[in-house]
Amino acid sequence: MSFILHERLAMEMLFLQRYFTRLDSAITEKLTKPASQEGGWMISLDLEQCNKLSATKYKTITQFANNFKLATELTKKTEFDVIHFKDEATKVKKKYMQLNIVFSKKSAGDLEQKGMKNITRKRLPPRPRVTVGSDAEDAWARKCIAILEAYEKELKTVKRKLIKADRERLARYRKIVGA
């Protein structure tokens, strides 16, 4: 079973949770510590969703939870702490109806301890108001290329690559300078 959580999707989900979600205090009281921290978010999946996303055919949430290894793998290899647990609130008799998966951002100290760096790209300079094809435009594009290539090199050290938007920017800047 595998889930693909792209960096851009994760960031958009964090943005949505932070700016557009309101949580009832009755819910947040039941959340584990990572779920209630700033920058954390939780998704709840029923058995059908779990099986559909992972291409499996488990008959109970308990079976799925016992075999769900992705949380530990994501915690080890990414900048997120990921835990999962069966949702007690949805328990009917002895059967759980939902699985909760909680994502929270690791602190910079945690990342350094585990040998992971929080890599961020330097801000690109704004495009100057110059004529297309001028020397000033060429100089600006070269600065942008240098920033993106340095960022790309840093990402490669942790086996990551530029997001699609940055790859497209890099191609545009290279076209401007004729590279």
Image (cartoon, helix red, strand yellow):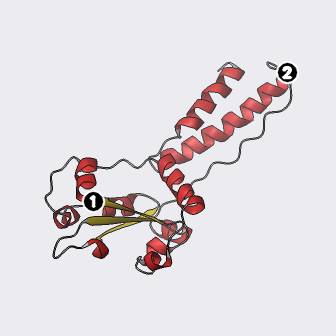
Q: Position of residue 155 (x, y in %)?
A: 52, 47
From the viewer's perspective, is residue 107 above or below residue 47? below
**Residue that protrudes farthest toward the front in the picture:** 92
How many numbered tags mark residues here?
A: 2
Tell me: 23 left or right of 149.
left
From the viewer's perspective, is residue 150 above or below residue 172? below
Q: Nearer the viewer, mark 1 or mark 2?
A: 1
From the viewer's perspective, is residue 70 above or below residue 177? below
Of the residues shown, which amino acid type is indicated by label 1? Asp
Residue at the spot of label 1: 46
Quarter holding residue 150? top right
Q: Position of residue 34 (x, y in %)?
A: 45, 73
Quarter holding residue 128? top right
- Near-viewer residue (58 or 105): 58
Give the residue at x 22% y 70%: 96
Image marks 1 and 2: residues in contact by CB distance under 8 Å: no
Residue at the spot of label 2: 131
Q: What element carries label 2?
A: loop
Give the residue at x 22% y 52%: 51
Give the residue at x 70% y 36%: 144
**Residue that protrudes farthest toward the right in the picture:** 130
Q: Where is residue 112 in the image (x, y as percent from the top left)?
A: 51, 67
- Near-viewer residue (138 or 39): 39
Of the residues shown, which amino acid type is indicated by label 2? Thr
Quarter holding residue 20? bottom right
